[in-house]
Amino acid sequence: MSVPFDPRDPLAVDSLLSAEEIDIRDTVRSFCAENITPHVAEWFERGELPGVRDLAREMGKLGLLGMHLQGYGCAGTSAVAYGLACLELEACDSGIRSLVSVQGSLAMYAIWRWGSEEQKRQWLPRMAAGEAIGCFGLTEPDHGSDPGSMRTSARRDGTDWVLNGRKMWITNGSVADVAVVWARAEDGVRGFVVPTSAPGFSAPLMHRKMSLRASVTSELVLDDVRLPADAALPDGTGLKAPLSCLNEARYGIVWGAVGAGRSALETAVDYAGTRVQFGRPIAGFQLTQAKLADMALEIHKALLLALHLGRLKDAGRLRPEQVSFGKLNNVREALDVCRTARTILGANGISLEYPVIRHMNNLESVLTYEGTAEMHALVIGQALTGIPAFR
């Protein structure tokens, strides 16, 4: 064969990508290598993401924020290009990818898809540039997988809306300039564009996390937050609106999980080649090679699945059930790859000198957010049988 085997691309997936997609991927990879990877282990250890506003502006200059959206200062890239960017961001750290996902696929997408023209013009250009940061308030302390039971309320007072309630586990909350908040009104669930400067709004940081530590995670507190009538998303009524946003974010996770797994796999391959035991590199032992082979199989199958779903999305044919296939498989397999990589690194596998334990801890959160593994299994189960088993 004239084409050499590439251990980093064993299935020649690069041959399935366009020149533009490869260029975008490589640009994001270089940006992360220069600006984030040298510092992210320290940020994780300290449990903070310093300089998040400067980082958002740099990402805005690259066109990463809301990059798959059209107009209003957004880059308008393909879904596959966006997925490749998510892969490279999460190969750096899940918290960094979460910053971009929440900004673009949740907060910006909600305004872009369900907002008024005035709301779009007011917020999207600034958010695309990283000059304004957004967050997305759906999950509550007592209602995660069942958002239809939310307690956050929106009541009319004259022409105004008054919001009361709590949201939990909100990425970007404490640094956000705008929050897209979902609340229960008399006519059902509604979305609202809430400036975080509004009286009665606060977003205390959540501490003591052992996962996604290089990420801003907050509680949203709404105590009689008064908003004008035009703060409501005019088309964002019913659960279909927030669930459509979650589906956008889940799509990015399908790709992002591959990045975390790839980083763990590459670390394990490199480590096994230099770690000498019993007079030879441990890469030369059969058990280690079996682990590496299985890890490579799962990561590159996951990459092919992500690419297939991306092509379906670009063709306008991607269904939510198919996104559930991707999230359930890719996050679960990436987490297993990280755990296996940890065994290859031995005691060094728990050290932040290597990225494996950081990815492993982060993926424990990714397994849960934007739909738990159990919920995605039930989505697929319903699609296969026609019988809902959620209640």
Image (spheres, grey):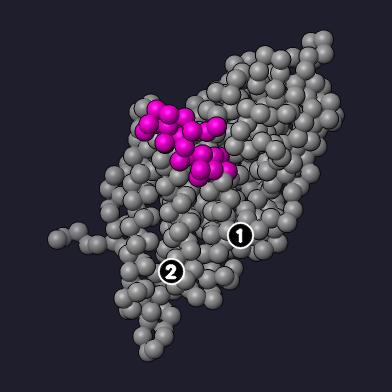
Q: Residue at x 68, y 29 (%)?
A: 150
In the image, what residue occupies the spot 51% across and 39% down?
A: 375
Q: Which residue is drawn at 56% across and 46% down?
A: 368
Q: Looking at the picture, how far across and down is residue 38, in whole percent?
A: 58, 63
Disc ID at residue 26? none
Whether residue 173 is visible to the viewer of this picture, yes or no, is no
Residue visible at 34% across and 53% down in the picture: 300
* Residue that mark 1 sits on: 40
Badge 2 is on which residue? Answer: 268
Q: How far apart are marks 2 and 1 (CA)?
A: 19 Å
SS under mark 2: helix
Is any atom of residue 367 visible in this view? Answer: yes
N-terminal-most mark, 2 or 1? 1
Quadrant where the C terminus sits is top right
Does residue 47 appear to the left or right of 198 in the view shown? Answer: left
Quadrant where the N terminus lies?
bottom left
* Relative side of 281 to 27, left or right: left
Residue 18 at x, y percent in the picture: 32, 41
> What is the magenta range?
369-391
Please name which of the two marks, 2 or 1, marks the residue nearer to the observer. Answer: 2
Q: Is the residue 88 above or below the residue 376 in the image?
A: below
- Drawn side of residue 101 relative to residue 316, left or right: right
